[in-house]
Image: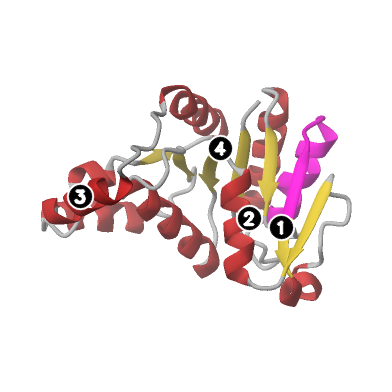
């Protein structure tokens, strides 16, 4: 079983198709015997992925900061619901509890989560797979931007390759499973590795 953290939108103003995407991911994770780590809300995409995962038999852990309990409407049905004092501790708890990350369409909060966990992987701070699932091209401009940054040598090609882009739920979970199976141990001398990585930029 893999504990999969899903970053996604909690907005109720988005196209319902995105909510259906999240629901499909929750069902697929449960079908393959994985558990879910979510942002702890029960509305929109965040709620859909947790609800369908539970309905299909998956264990769900929700992590939500105290200030957002009222705004996102906490997922009280979660098998485990952790309320943290702030956003930083929320992300730290989600990261620690997860073996892999899937990023669905979302806003600036989702982008922050994606970039932070991707940067940490590119620096060798973890080896957990980071997968984007974007069937409708919400992140198409971001994907092009990353390619442009590689071309301009602001981003190393190796760092860009640490992020896996997919266009459907099945491919996303396939990438998670392949990434977990192929992950290597974090080097013991992490400071040396990070120093070499930074010196190697771009």
Q: Which residue is more in the foreground, 74 or 190? A: 190
Residue 63: mark in rendering: 1
Front: mark 1 or 3: 3
Q: Position of residue 52 (x, y in %)?
A: 78, 40
Residue 2: say if magenta. Answer: no
Q: How is the image coloured?
A: secondary structure
Residue 130 in view of the camera: yes
Residue 52: say if magenta. Answer: yes
Q: Mark 3 or mark 4: which comes first in sequence?
A: 4
Give left or right: position of 73 versus 186.
Answer: right
Front: mark 2 or 1: 2
Q: Residue furthest front?
A: 189
Callout 4–callout 2 Cβ contact below 8 Å: no
Element on which disc 4 rests: loop
Callout 3–callout 2 Cβ contact below 8 Å: no
Q: Residue at x 64, y 38 (%)?
A: 25
Q: Which residue is mark 2?
A: 93
Q: Mark 4 or mark 2: which comes first in sequence?
A: 2
The residues tagged by marks 3 and 4 sit, at their Cα atoms, a distance apart of 23 Å
Seen in the picture, residue 77 relative to 172 is either above or below; the reply is below
Element on which disc 1 rests: strand
The quadrant holding residue 189 is top left
Q: Position of residue 95 (x, y in %)?
A: 56, 50
Give left or right: position of 42 versus 163.
Answer: right
Structural crowding at the residue carrying mark 1, measured as other residues with C-alpha within 10 Å and reported as few (<14), some (14–19) or many (≥20): many
């Amino acid at each position: 079983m893999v504990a999969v953290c899903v970053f996604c939108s909690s907005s109720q103003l988005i196209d319902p198709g995105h909510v259906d995407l999240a629901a499909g991911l929750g069902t697929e994770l449960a079908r393959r015997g994985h558990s879910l780590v979510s942002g702890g809300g029960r509305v929109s995409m965040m709620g859909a992925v947790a609800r369908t995962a539970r309905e299909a038999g998956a264990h769900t852990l929700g992590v939500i900061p105290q200030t957002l309990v009222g705004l996102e409407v906490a997922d009280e049905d979660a098998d485990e619901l952790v309320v943290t004092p702030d956003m930083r501790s929320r992300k730290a708890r989600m990261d620690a509890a997860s073996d892999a990350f899937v990023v669905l369409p979302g806003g600036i909060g989702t982008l922050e989560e994606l970039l932070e966990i991707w940067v940490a992987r590119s620096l060798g701070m973890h080896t957990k797979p980071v997968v984007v699932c974007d069937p409708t091209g919400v992140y198409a401009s971001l994907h092009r931007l990353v390619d442009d940054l590689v071309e301009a040598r602001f981003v190393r090609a190796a760092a860009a390759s640490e992020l896996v882009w997919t266009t459907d739920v099945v491919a996303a979970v396939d990438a998670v499973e392949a990434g977990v199976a192929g992950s290597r141990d974090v080097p013991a001398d992490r400071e040396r590795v990070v120093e070499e990585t930074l010196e190697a930029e771009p």
